[in-house]
Amino acid sequence: MGRPRRTLKLLREIALEHASVAHPDLASMARELGQLVHRDSAAIATRLARLPRRGQGLGRWQLVQRNQPPVSMLVMAWPANHCTPVHDHAGLWGLELTLVGALEVQSWRRDPDSGDLRALGRDWLGPGDGIWFEGDPNHVHRCRNLSQHETALTLHVYGGELNHYQAYEQTAPAGPWTARTTDCAVAGHWPA
């Protein structure tokens, strides 16, 4: 169990090193984390294999929370075909990196005056692939596990603790978007 534990520790160390400033270079963080995931994907899958069995639905396990500068790091387990609502990240910067499996990420830009959402595009992430956002309060996205049968695992690094966010819904296909505040639940702490 030594190598898988060491790999998670290295992921944590890389993220914390980059997050030692208020506005980290998220592209560099994603590149370094992704290289490690590509190199040690089997060790990561072994270490995190029991996460999907710990609970039902989307699971979030905290690896790190630090206050100065603020940063939190989570591992998330995505059940087969799970899709989040369209949501923001409360103005935090963030990086999301696939560890095991594959995700689709669809992004929008929220108009700060009208609240309307404009579709920006889709990204597909496999192991070691990441996507990031620079703390724009008008960036929103939705993530979906692409597998119909397998759990996906992702690493999330945020510029603070994400306790609440806005989830957006459309009342009709071309209708207005409404927002509701949603709380984030953490299933527990995962020792890296």
Image: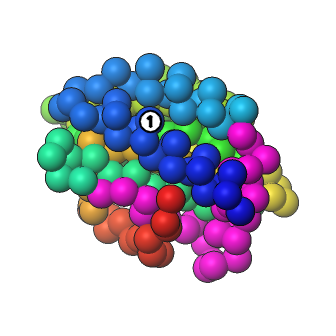
Q: Residue shown at 20%/46% (left/top)?
A: 70
Q: Residue shown at 73%/50% (left/top)?
A: 43
Q: Is residue 16 above or below residue 83?
A: above
Give coordinates of residue 68: x percent, y percent. Answer: 15, 46
Residue 166 or residue 51, whichever sits in front: 51
Give coordinates of residue 176: x percent, y percent. Answer: 35, 44
- Residue 29 belongs to magenta span: no
Q: Dot 1 corresponds to which residue?
A: 14
Give coordinates of residue 52: x percent, y percent. Answer: 68, 69
Q: Is residue 89 above or below residue 125?
A: below
Q: Is residue 35 above or below residue 148?
A: above
Disc 1 marks a residue whose amino acid type is: Ile
- Dot 1: what SS? helix
Q: Residue furthest front?
A: 2
Which image quarter holds the N terminus?
A: bottom right
Magenta extent? 40-65
